[in-house]
Image (cartoon, coloured by chain):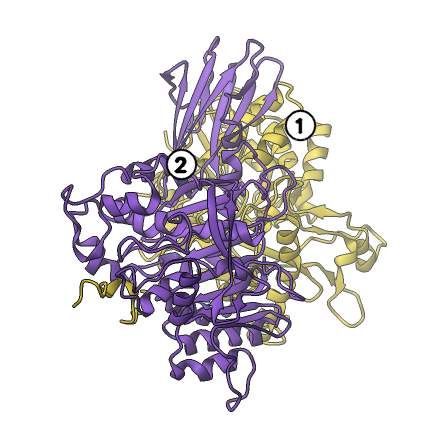
Chain colours: A purple, B yellow
Amino acid sequence: MPVKLIVAAGNWESKQVKSTFTVFADEVILVAKDRSKQIYELPTGARHVRVVATPKTDNYWETKVALVVASNGTVSPETGFAPWVTVTKASGATGGAILITVRVSRFRDVTGTVRDLLKVVPGTPGTGRTGGAPAKPELVATYGKWPPDDLDIHPLLRVHSIDVANPVKPGGILNFKASAVAVDANSVVLELAGVKAPRLFGVVWPDAVPRKLGALPTPFFIYIRQTGGQDRKNVFVSGGVKGPYPYNFDYAERCLFESQHYSETPITMRKGWMLRAKGVPYQVARSGAKVVTVFPVADSDDSVSYGVLSNFDEMGRLLAELQAVMFWMVGSSAPPRTVGKTAIAAYSSANGTLVGWLNSNGASTFLKDNISAVYFLDPPGVGDCVDAGLLLRRRLGTDKRVRLYSARDDSRFFPAYRRLIGLKATDPLPAMPFLRGADDNKISLALFPLSSWVETFKEFGMNAFAQGQKWQYWDAHHLVPATVITHALSDHSVAGRDV
Amino acid sequence: MGELTFLLGVDGGADAFYGLAKKFFTAAAATVIDAPAVGQTLEGVLKHLSTLKTEQKVINLVSHVNGFAAMACPVTLADQRGGRRTMTIDDLNDAVAAKVLAPPSPTVVTAKTRVVIYGCDVGRVMGFLVRLSTLLGSPGELLAPTRQGMFHFDGTNVVYRQAQTWSVVRKELLLPAGGTAPVVGWTKFRETFVAEAVEKFGANAIGTGRSIDVEELKRKLMTIASTATTTIGPTYFLEKGINIHPVPGESTKDAARRVAPRSNTDLVTSPAASLEAVDDTSLVTTISGADAFATNPDESAFAFSIVVLAKMIDVPVVIAENDGYRRITSSPARAPSPGPKPMGGGATTGGDPSGPDAFAEDLRAVLDELLADGAPQAEIDAILAAVPQGDATSDIVTDVPDAPPVPDDLASLALPPEVVT
């Protein structure tokens, strides 16, 4: 009786993913022996087997695996394929059966593809891009070199980080200290199959979050940058951008790379206008939180935007799937069955998105069990964010963390600021700038207006106006997300860490 | 030569099972052998076969089944005369051991003969099939349904269909004598039945360790039950029982109490892979004398009640080793049969050969062969356990509402003040 090769495909939970299979033995395609084309006969003497599992659904990517057949007939994955395939065998007196279970994922690694997108800056060399979109000279001036060699988060020698215990100094100056920061992490970009958005997910996985058998559920921090529709008018239209979402330069640079990197340090003069590096991984590292940061890349069509992330339970499933594929990528075949606590930060217009999500996912298990904190980073709609945050705590308990960091010192927002930290309508707000905690530090409110940033830069020898830059609110607007995440993810007095 | 079909019973009351079956097979150009007025016996079938001179390709046996591996056809005429109405695995055991029945000629029932049982779920009990096959002269194949079956007039033709079922052993008859609805009324009965079924099948679902939502199971069964009555239709209730045979001098109560435990299926070794698979095929129902109850105040009459909620699977039944049929062979397996094709269109076709259960069927065949080749059961079980189950796409969300409009107060829309002069 010949040895039967049986092939099947499943996801990280060992749930079936119906697929078509192509099976090679020593590079010869085998002919299936059954109706579903999943059962083959292993030719006598075959030494190598390759299996291509092509899911019949658009929601999973194809997986190719290679296996080696030992002289005693044992079939095992070739080096590097072990997490992507399992082998189970049964032997009779004259024959046997070998089940090859191929793991397929909703995510695939596209790090190299995205890195390559950064190599060619749109537009005509030597001329600027319209609308303030960064051309190559500005990119070089900001990041030191362009294009980058890779998407790694390289060490920086002098990064200014806010002093989380004493964020404000006398004189209305924000308290920053400079030091070297090394983000010991694996930085990759994954593509999600079968959705309108988000198609791309930047992932920065610190070495301090182990990927090994018995690892605890992974804590996540999701950074939601501003929605992309605004970029269409001033950025995406300029310079002859090529390629639809998500594979063009501006999605790779503006919507991902810019969030993940710094121009040396956040306390530095901008080199242009649109390019405002946020350095989120550096802030996470400086906070001391052992958390994986995820950077979804939205479609610049605002009606699509962050797509399926609007469903929190789907967000949870995606993080679990992402966790699994990240474990497989380092050779660990047993990811945790669930994910850990998750914090979500939204910046600028994305705060409206986050508020919508919070208000429409009241029954979400992932919101109830996993989402432990929401961070509103200089939201336009302060009141909506405050109300959504307070409602979250009322519905799901006061251990949910709500932190709002604002640069808006317009008095029309003051009532909302007061509501957040439990002040009466007649109570005065602290003198700006300030950062106040409430309810055992499970609530934070920071108000860092433009004036505080101007004074802070002066302390470090940078006078924006003297140096020809007419700073306005928008400068403070970008500096908030570039600095305050260090505080949000820090170990808060009494409250402890959010994730 | 057409197929040879034996109707093993006759209709009584409102039951039209055999009448519809006769129309089905007649339309398919089969030779139909009616049952005697008192019903057919296995002995009668064998006697008819003994009159034939040529090899039979397909022999169909159409019979009611009580759901606990008992076809409504006594083994012998003597049994029938003695009041027996069914043929159980014990009866077949006795018949094989006693050699009371002469097998048909090996030139009539051969290694190329396929015997197909039409009716209900007798295929769930392998031992029954093995013994029946032996008594029928070890045909090349014997196929028997693992689900409840029915003949159904679809408006144009009579078609053969199977049903997904959920059985609950109860201690009250579904309908009171002469009644057309449960004593508590259909609405209350449905609620009670579904609650009992969810308790039984939901526990089994949870025990599989898979993400089967008991609330979802409840909603599903309530939906199915909501239109079900005892009238055979897209959904329906059916009551099955066990015959009680007092020996001389024995009370009906004592005879009922000594009914040995019996199950409606072999031991189920693979857990239900999904909510869809949670039904009678993935959970063993066992009854015993303790389940009997008095049907009158003086306890002179006893009965068993297995109430079955059924949902018709309105697709043609493929007569092959699959989700709805079990096959035993005494010769190399043959290609799947499409079953008889009624003239006039509609009805039975071969179905999709690469349908959702094709892999499971073919895998099972490979593993059965390997098991016969001496592979350890543990290794077979390991392969079965390693095969991905369920549907990884079932929970995926891809369609979400459009995102809300974005406010105008946006950084990227603002041009640098150095430029705007």
* Relative vertical location of residue B294 with respect to residue A36 in this rendering, above or below: below
- The answer to the question of whether label 1 and label 2 lie on touching residues, with beta carbons closer than 8 A, is no
Q: Dot 2: few (<14), some (14–19), or many (≥20) neighbours within 10 Å?
A: many
Position of A52 with respect to B11 (left or right) is: left
Between the residue at mark 1 and the residue at mark 2, the CA separation in whole angstroms equals 28 Å
The residue at 51%/63% (across/down) is A175
**Tag 2, which secondary structure?**
strand
The residue at 13%/43% (across/down) is A124
Q: Using the rendered image, report if marks 1 and 2 lie on a common chain.
A: no
Residue B348 x, y percent position in the rendering: 36, 43
Identify the image quadrant of the C terminus of chain A.
Answer: bottom right
**In the foreground, A191 or B420:** B420
Residue B310 in view (yes/no): yes
* Relative vertical location of residue B166 with respect to residue A404 in this rendering, above or below: above
Q: Between tags 1 and 2, which lies in front?
A: 2
* Relative vertical location of residue A364 with respect to residue B386 in this rendering, above or below: below
Residue A318 in view (yes/no): no
Q: Which residue has dot 2 on it?
A: A19
**In the foreground, A246 or B74:** A246
Q: How many numbered circles does the render carry?
A: 2
Three-letter code, disc 2: Ser
Q: Which residue has dot 1 on it?
A: B377
Q: Dot 1: few (<14), some (14–19), or many (≥20) neighbours within 10 Å?
A: few
Residue A356 x, y percent position in the rendering: 40, 70
Position of B375 with respect to A292 (left or right) is: right
Q: Chain of mark 1?
A: B
**Tag 1, which secondary structure?**
helix
The residue at 61%/72% (across/down) is A398
Q: Chain of mark 2?
A: A
**In the foreground, A292 or B190:** A292
